[in-house]
Amino acid sequence: MADARRQLRSGTVVLGGMGLLAAALTACSSDPDKRCVDRDSYTAAKGYQVVSDKNCTSAKSAVDADYYYGGKKKAGWVSGGSFTKPRSGSGSSSGGGHSVKRGGFGGGHDSSGG
């Protein structure tokens, strides 16, 4: 009986630890992918040139730098993202700005009463 209890406890600890690990990984993945880029370097074929982060944090930067969110990085260039920081926890990167509206008890305006 003691062995069964010990196994149950260790299983609970493992499952609890897995839950904490999943929560930590989810929190890390929700951070927006941002890169410091030179705004003046844009080309249609490559996108924006990625520069050192110190260009985005220093007021005395030699380039017009800003953070660029999302997109795909290839050979020091990034494209397909946006300069607009995504809202945390939005769950979508489309930026459509549409919200889901759900009816409450009794339906919406379209329902016929009676």
Image (cartoon, grey):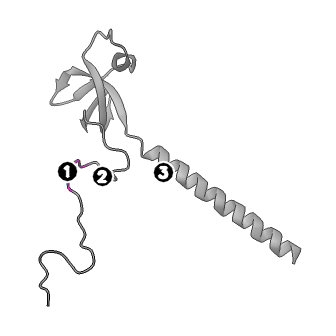
Magenta highlight on residue 7: no
The answer to whether one can see residue 76 in this image is: no
Q: State the residue position of label 2.
A: 92
Is disc 2 placed on a helix, strand or loop? loop
Q: Quadrant of the C terminus?
A: bottom left
Q: The disc labelled 2 sits on which kind of residue?
A: Ser
Q: Which of the numbered marks, if any, corresponds to residue 26?
A: 3
Q: Residue drawn 76% across and 67% down?
A: 9
Name the amino acid, label 1.
Gly
Q: Which residue is mark 1?
A: 96
**Local SS, label 3:** helix
- Percent across and percent down for residue 3 are 86, 72
Image location (x, y in percent) of residue 89: 38, 50
CA separation, marks 3 and 2? 14 Å
Q: Percent x, y for residue 68?
A: 29, 31
Q: Quadrant of residue 102?
A: bottom left
Q: Residue 13 in the image: state x and y as whole percent.
A: 71, 61
Quadrant (top left/top right/bottom left/bottom right) for the N terminus: bottom right
Compared with 107, 38 (above or below) is above
**Secondary structure that dominates the magenta span:** loop
The first of marks 3 and 1 along the sequence is 3
State the mark number for residue 58.
Answer: none
Q: Residue at x 31, y 36 (%)?
A: 69
Alpha carbons under labels 1 and 2: distance apart: 9 Å
Marked residue nearer the N-terminal end (3 or 2): 3
Tell me if 15 is positioned left or right of 113 in this view.
Answer: right
The image quadrant of residue 37 is top left
User: In the current view of this chain or complex, which residue is farthest to the front?
Assistant: 114
Furthest toward the right, the residue is 2
Kind of residue sitting beneath label 3: Thr
Give the magenta part as a residue range.
Answer: 94-98
CB atoms of marks 1 and 2 within 8 Å:
yes
